[in-house]
């Protein structure tokens, strides 16, 4: 599932080649969003 949702985020990098820093921040935020539910302990929610 993570790969299926990361691919569109990676595609954004192709269109934002002139804004590389912004694209990298977008990808990092996207990955953090995906991993948070996977790494959060259910008892702390």
Image (cartoon, grey):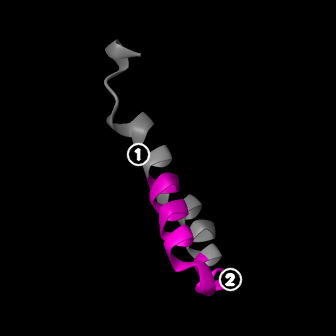
Residue at point 31%, 24% (across, down): 41
Which is more toward the observer, 29 or 20? 20
Residue 36 percent coordinates (x, y): 41, 38
Q: Is residue 45 above or below residue 17?
A: above
Which type of secondary structure does the marked residue at label 1 adopt? helix
Q: Quadrant of residue 8?
A: bottom right
Which range is magenta? 13-31
Residue 29 located within the stretch drawn in magenta: yes
Residue at point 49%, 62% (across, down): 25
- Image quarter where the C terminus lies is top left
Residue highlighted by disc 2: 15
Q: Could you tell whether 42 is left or right of 4 in the image?
A: left
Q: In this view, does 8 lie above or below 38?
A: below
Residue highlighted by disc 1: 35
Q: Quadrant of residue 4?
A: bottom right
Residue 8 located within the stretch drawn in magenta: no
Residue 1 percent coordinates (x, y): 51, 54
Q: Could you tell whether 2 is left or right of 7 in the image?
A: left
Query: In this orientation, does residue 1 appear?
Result: no
* Sequence-first tag of 1 and 2: 2
């Amino acid at each position: 599932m993570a790969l299926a949702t990361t691919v569109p985020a990676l595609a954004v990098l192709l269109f934002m080649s002139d804004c590389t820093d912004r694209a990298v921040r977008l990808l990092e935020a996207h990955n953090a969003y995906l991993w948070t539910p996977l790494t959060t302990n259910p008892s702390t929610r």
